[in-house]
Image (cartoon, helix red, strand yellow):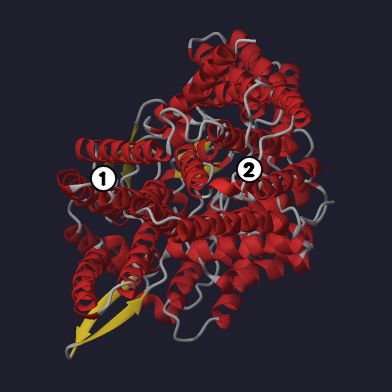
Amino acid sequence: MNTSSETTVGKWLTFGGLGILVIFMFLPPSYYLMAAFPWILLWQGGFLLLGIGLMVLLRQFARPFLPLGYGLDWGVLAVAIACILSAIFAPHKGVALFNLVTVSGYGVALYGLRNFSGQGFWTWDNQWRGLVGIGFGIGLVSLGGWLLGDHSLDRNSIPFGHHNFMAAYFCLMVPIILSFALAQQHKIRLLLLTLLVAIFPYLLYTCSSRGGFVGILLWAIATIAFVISRTKGKRRIISGAIALFFLGIMVTAGLQHPRVQQLLQVNFNNGLPSIQVTVDGETEDRLFMWQAGLNILKDRPLTGIGLGNMSREYNRYRPLEVGSGAAHIQQLHSNPMQLLGELGLIGGLAIAFLVVQLVRLGWRVHQQTSDPAVRRLLYGLGGGWFAYAMATLTDYQLENIPISLTLALSVILLITVADQALCEAQPEPLAMGQRRLWSIGSLAGILGALLVGAPYSVGMYLFARGQALWAQGRPEEAFTKVTQAYGLNGWNVNYPLRLGLWLWETRSLAGDRPADKQRTTELAAAYFLEAQARIPYDYYANVNAGIVLLDLDPSLAQGYFERAIQMLSRESEPTYFLLGQTYLQTNEPEKAIASFALQGLVDPTVMTFGQWEREPLAAIRIEAVEASLVLYQTLIDRLDPQDPYILTLQERMAWLAWWHGLPIPHQNNLSQFSPMVQALILGDRQPEQALEIIDQQIAANPDNNTRWLILKAWFQADFELNLNVQLANETEPQSYLLSSRRAEGMTLQTWLKQIPQIARPIGSDRLASRLLYRSEDFDAVDTVLRPEGLETFQLLTLLGLERGYPRTFPTLDQLINEVRTNTLDLPHPTANGFQLTER
C-alpha cells in the first residue's frame, strides 16, 4: 500500500476543495452567486472535493484518523441530530434536505482539515496567517469595489452581497487581525496595525450596519475592560485614558452616521446631553420578526419550522400588527432567533452545547499555555466570536458561505492550538472498525449529496437555457427545457411558475378558438396550483392561483383569495374586490358586500374601477360604498380624537362619496383637505373657487402640474390640454385633446373616465427568487397577474388621489381582522392556531 501517495491525494483533494471555497469568497456578490448558474458549481465542487478527500483519509488505514476531540464531537453530533430532526419534520422536505446537505459540507470541512492539523504547512501559526491574509484580502476587495463602484447605494455590500454580511465579517476578523498584529515584532507589527486602522474602521463605516456598529463597540468595551483589569497603578490610568480616548472617537463617529441617527439623536441642552430614541421601519420590522419567531416556537417548539423553510412558512406566524411591513421573510434577522425558528429548542440547545464546548476548550488552552502568542490568538478568536455574536443579534448570516467557512476555519485553528497546548488530552484515533463504518458512511453521504445537489444545479442550467430559448422565439424548445428542469427538481417553485406564466401569456394566440383558449388556461392553472402548493403561504402565489381560476371555476378561486387576505390584510392588490366577485357568483351577497367594503377601506381607488358601472356590481355599488364609509367612520371613532391621521381618513371618505354621487361626509373640514380634494368637491357647486385653487397650484408647481392642468381643462371652457398618455395596453404613447364639456351637462366624474385602460400583469420589487427562494431568476415569482377586463381610468389615476396607510396601523389591522372574522369567518392565522381557514 502506497500510504504516502494516498496521503498526498487526500491532501490535494482537501486543500483543493478549501481553495475553491476561498476563491468563491472573493466573488461579488457571493450570496447571490450561491444560487446562480454556473457559479453554484464552484462552491458545490469545493464541498464535493472536501467530501471525497475525507473519504480518502478515512480509507487510509495505515494513517491515524482523529476526531475533533475535546468534547467537540459530541457538540457536532448534537447539532447534526437537531438538523436531521428538523429536516424530517419540516413541511417542505425537499428544501430542508438541500439545506441539510449544504450544512453537512461544513462538518466535512471540519473533519477533513482537522486531520492535517499541525502537519506540514497546516500549523496553527500558518492557519492564523491564512485567516488574516484572507481578511485583509476581503477588506481590500471591499474597499476597492466601494471606491470604484456606484455610490447610489449608501451601504457597502462588496463582495458578500449584503452590507450586514460585510459588517459582521469585519467584526469577526478585526479582533483576529489585531491579535495577530500584536503578536508580531517591531516593523511588521507597526505595518499591520497601520493597515488595520486605515482600512477596517472605514469599511465598517461604509457598511452602514447598525448591528456591526454594536458588535465592534461592545467588543471594544469588553477589550478595554479586560486590559484595564490586568494592569495596575499608573499603567492602569494611562491605559484607561488611552482606551477611553479611542472609545470616545468610536462612539462619536458612530453617532454621526446617518443610519445611527435614524435611531439615536443626541442633543445638548444647557450643556447636558439628552438622547432621543426613534424606532424606524427596519427596527420595527425586526421586532415583529422576532415575535413571529416566538410564534413558531409556540407552534413547533421542538424541531422548529425546518431547515430553509422559513420563507415558505413565515406568513402564517406573522403578527397581525405588522400591517404592510415584514412580509415574505426568508430570515428573522437574528442568528439566535433564526436558529431557534428553524431548528427549534432541540437545535438551540445543541448549538449552545457546541458553543460551550468551544469556549471551554479555549479556556483550557489559556490555562495551560504560557506562550504569549497563543494567548493573543485566543483573545483574538474569543473577541472575534464575541463581536460577531453581538453583531448578529439583529441579522442572520450563517447561510452565507464566506462567513460560515471563516467560522469553521477559526474552529480548526483553535483545535490545532489545543493539540499543541494540551498534549496529554489529545483525542485517540478512530479504531479500525469505526473507520470502516465511517468510510462507508462517507461514501453514502457523497452519493446522497450528489443525488440532492446535482439535480438542483442541472435544473438551474436547463431553466436558464429555457429562458434563453424563449427569448429567441423558440417556445417549444424552451418549454421542454423548463419541463425537464421541473422533473429534476420538483420543489423549485420557479419552474411551475415559469411554465404557467408562459401558458398564460400564450392564451391570446388562441384568437377566436375558445376551446384552445380554455385548454391553455387549464394547463396554466395546473402549473400555478402546483407552484402555490410549493409556497402555500406566499400571498402572491395564492392571488395568482385565484386569478387563473376565475375563468374556470370561481368557487375554486375563492379559496385562494381567502387564503391571501388572511395572511396579508392590506396589500395593494385588489384581492378583496376579486374575492367579493366570487361571493356574488356563489350567491353569497352579504359576504360580497363585506369584501367590497374592506377593499374600499384598504384601497379606495379600487372602488373607482370600471366594473362598478356594469352588472352584477352596478346593482350593489352604492351599498358597497356605503358599507365602506361605515368602516372608515368606525376606524375614526376608534382613534384618539387628536390623532392627525383622522383628517386623512375623512378626506378619503369625502372623495370616495363624491365619486359615487353620495352625500359628502365631513364637509365642515373641507378647508383642511388637500387642494385636489377641495377642487373636486367644490367643482359641483362652486366651480369658480375650484378654478382659483387650480390656478394657485399651477403657479406654485410650474414644473409638476399635469394633474392640475387636467382639471383646468375641465373647469375653464376656453382652455384645452393636449395630453400624451402611455397606456398599459399600448406600445406607443397616445395623444388626447382634453376640453371642458360642462356645458353639455356631463359630470366631472364621467369626464375623468374618458381614457380607460386595462390593467396588465406587473412585476414587484420583492426579488423573491433571489432572496426568498434562493434561485437565480426572479421574474417568474415576482409577477403579479391581473384578471382580464380590470378597467381603470387614466385621468383619475393622474390626479394622484391614492395615498397609502402607514406601515404599522394596529387600529386599522384590528378592525380589518374583526370584520373579516365576523362576516367572512376568516380570522388571522395567529388567532387561529397559526392555521389558515380552509373551506
Q: Position of residue 295 (x, y in %)?
A: 68, 63
Badge 2 marks a residue whose secondary structure is loop
Q: Quadrant of residue 742?
A: bottom left
Is the residue 278 above or below the residue 146 in the image? below
Is the residue 173 above or below the residue 550 in the image? below
Between 23 and 112, the one nearer to me in the picture:
112
Q: Position of residue 115 (x, y in %)?
A: 56, 32
- Of pointers 2 and 1, the one earlier in the residue sequence: 2
Report how many numbered discs are placed on residues in the image: 2
Q: Which residue is mark 2?
A: 427
Q: Is residue 344 left or right of residue 10?
A: right
Q: Is residue 837 left or right of residue 710?
A: right
The mark closer to the camera, 2 or 1, is 2
In the rendered structure, which amino acid carries the disc numbered 2? Pro
Residue 769 circle label = none
Q: Residue at x 73, y 64 (%)?
A: 298
Q: Which residue is mark 1?
A: 720
Camera sees residue 708? yes
In the rendered structure, which amino acid carries the disc numbered 1? Glu
Whole-number angstrom distance, CA of label 2 to CA of label 1: 90 Å
Q: Residue at x 68, y 53 (%)?
A: 347
Badge 1 marks a residue whose secondary structure is strand
Q: Is residue 49 left or right of residue 232?
A: right
Q: Position of residue 454 (x, y in %)?
A: 64, 20
Crowd class of label 1 (few under 14; some 14 to 19; many from 20; radius 10 Å): some
